[in-house]
Amino acid sequence: MTQVEFLKMVEPFKDKVFRLAKRLLVSREEAEDATQEILIKLWNNKNQIEQYRNIEAFSMTMTKNLCFDKLKSKHSQNLKIIHNNYKDNHITLQNEIELKNSVDWVAKLMEDLPDQQKIVMQLRDIEQYEFKEISKMLNIKEATIRVSLSRARKTLRSKLIKIQSYGVG
Amino acid sequence: MVLVRIEKLLNKYENGQTTLDEEVELRDYFSQSVIASQFEVYRPLFNYFEVTCKEKSTADISLQTNSYHHTYKWLATAAMIVIAVTIFTKTAMSSSLNFNELTEDQLIVFNQTRKAMDLLANNINKGSEGFNALTLMSKSLNKGAENIFLLESFTETKNKIFKINN
């Protein structure tokens, strides 16, 4: 497989990988890095890749795992003030001031959801995958996915009601 | 009629029971400019989904890292060989020179050089003694800085007390 062929193959889901990474890691730069890492991993294993039936689903699973690893190592070195930690906070603070409309609020509310619900909502409501596909990607049962999704949707709805009736959540 | 349908779909949606088609239907409904006021609360949610699914990664993809590794490996190997050969030839050449084979002139030069080196070493030692004093000074400086910090926190507390009094 040449590089051009490879890039053509990953093109349709490259941004999905990026958006999932951004959902979990929050900062744009880190998400770009994660996307790059995933693509390099795929490229290095390009010989085995052709055997996989669904490269897209495989990539999404890889992305989820990579982001979890990153989050874990971030938590374990919490005391280090690295540039990324710093910037994250800064941006959210800034956002809070600048949130012009309630659409921006949804992004912020999604940040507060538990990781599992975040991922499920990202894959279903934003990327519009079938439950079957999500179940394969995350290796959890469809029923569990429906439950998480339902919780996430209800939480967001009730928080949005709060914001709209009191101005600020 | 539409309202009843949307109401039903929203209910299903919240329970995680909608199909993808039904979710598209909901999204379409909420992209209209005018919607029933009781559904207004859901509007940001569906509008956000609509917007955020278009976000793109802007970074350029480079798959070059792998080949870089290879070049570095080759460079490292080449450098190793060069260093090994140099050391080998140097030692092979110098081992042929023996102390006893030196002429008188060469011995004199050698001794002079050694003296000069000794002198230099002595001076360096003196210099490092001076360094010790410097370290001592920096230690006291740090202590001073700590004290200033204490003073600062004291003033802060003091200011707080004053504020309370005022």
Image (cartoon, grey):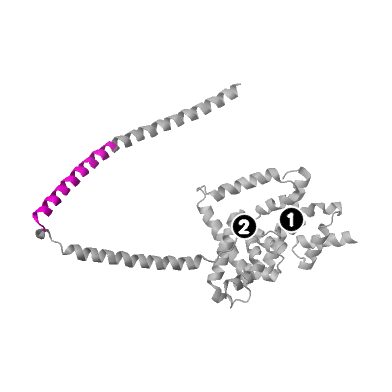
Q: In which quarter of the image is the C terminus of chain B?
A: top right
Q: Where is residue A108 in the image (x, y as percent from the top left)?
A: 68, 51
Q: In which quarter of the image is the N terminus of chain B?
A: bottom right
Apparent side of residue B83 relative to residue A139 in the rendered image (left or right): left
Residue, disc 2? A24
Residue sitting at 21 percent across and 66 percent down?
A: B92
Taking the magenta stretch, the answer to whether it contains residue B108 is yes
Q: Residues within 10 Å of mark 1 (few under 14, many from 20)?
A: some
Please name whichever residue, B46 or A151, is drawn nearer the observer in this view of the structure: B46
Q: Position of residue A122 (x, y in %)?
A: 68, 61
Residue A141 visible? The answer is: no
Apparent side of residue A156 relative to residue B158 in the rendered image (left or right): right
Taking the magenta stretch, the answer to whether it contains residue A143 is no
Q: How crowded is mark 2: few (under 14 residues within 10 Å), some or many (20 or more)?
A: many
Apparent side of residue B15 relative to residue A114 in the rendered image (left or right): right
The span picked out in magenta is B102-130
User: Label for residue B48?
Assistant: 1
Q: Which chain is indicated by disc 2?
A: A
Q: Which amino acid does label 1 sit on?
A: Tyr
Q: Label 1 to label 2, Cα distance in Å?
A: 17 Å
Dot 1: element: helix
Q: Quadrant of residue A136?
A: bottom right
Residue sitting at 55 percent across and 70 percent down?
A: A43
Residue sitting at 22 percent across and 64 percent down?
A: B91
